[in-house]
Image (cartoon, rainbow, N blue to C red):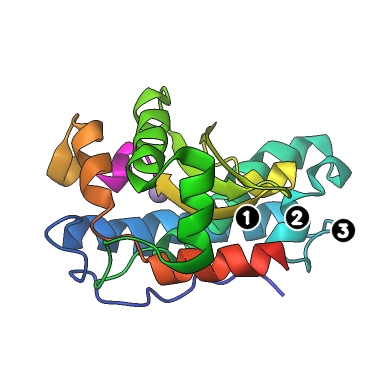
Amino acid sequence: MAFELPALPYSFDALEPHIDAQTMEIHHDRHHKAYVDNANAALEGTGLANESVEQVLTNLDSLPEEKRTAVRNNAGGHANHSLFWQIMGPDGGGAPSGDLAKAIDDTFGGLDALKSAVNDGGAKRFGSGWSWLVWDGTGLAVYSTPNQDSPIMQDDVPLLGIDVWEHAYYLSYQNKRPAYLEAWWNVVNWDEVARRYDEARG
Ligand code: MN
């Protein structure tokens, strides 16, 4: 079963004014679609062609060397963007509750400290990449990755990720990546992040 582009779970303009409709349309319909198409093309005829994106990303070494980079970049892009659409929403923002809120307090000292750590990772990521909150098997952690590398590749579970590729913000924010990172928290869907946290802990 080849990968498929998932439908955006809200309208292109649902995240305005924080993320503009044109950015969302290009980002979902063109960028994410290209990752899906290119991943499928690179995986065709390999032993991972019918596997889940998680299986693909944790078994890159089993691929022929000439396919590995294309699969890493494009299956990574598919996984990252599939998560990204879900952990944003039109009723976003605010603060998490329950176990996730407690874990954030215990690990980082509070929500503001978590936001600062994620934003700092995103601002300092040179070039293109992502800034993440992950479940690392024992607790929460924050780090950034280059390009389309996914935390799944190192057996972590991504709970929240901010895309810091210029295509994610350039139309509205131009070179002001920190302003985009600051505004992004107005669209975070904490219910979905908390659901992923509960699922990750098993
Ligand atoms: Mn992107």
The span shown in magenta is 163-169
Could you tell me if the residues under marks 2 and 1 are in contact, i.e. CB atoms within 8 Å? Answer: yes
Secondary structure category for the residue under label 2: helix
Relative placement, left or right, of 144 versus 12 is right
Q: Is residue 166 above or below residue 31?
A: above
Q: Position of residue 93 (x, y in %)?
A: 27, 61
Q: Residue at x 30, y 37 (%)?
A: 166
- In primary-sequence order, the first of circles 1 and 3 is 1
Given the image, on which type of amino acid does mark 3 rest?
Gly
Q: Which residue is mark 1?
A: 39
Relative placement, left or right, of 84 versus 136 is left
Relative placement, left or right, of 134 versus 56 is left
Could you tell me if the residues under marks 2 and 3 are in contact, i.e. CB atoms within 8 Å? Answer: no
Q: Which residue is mark 3?
A: 47
The verdict on residue 166 being magenta is: yes
Q: Residue at x 47, y 68 (%)?
A: 98
Q: In the depicted view, which residue is nearer to us: 113 or 91?
A: 113
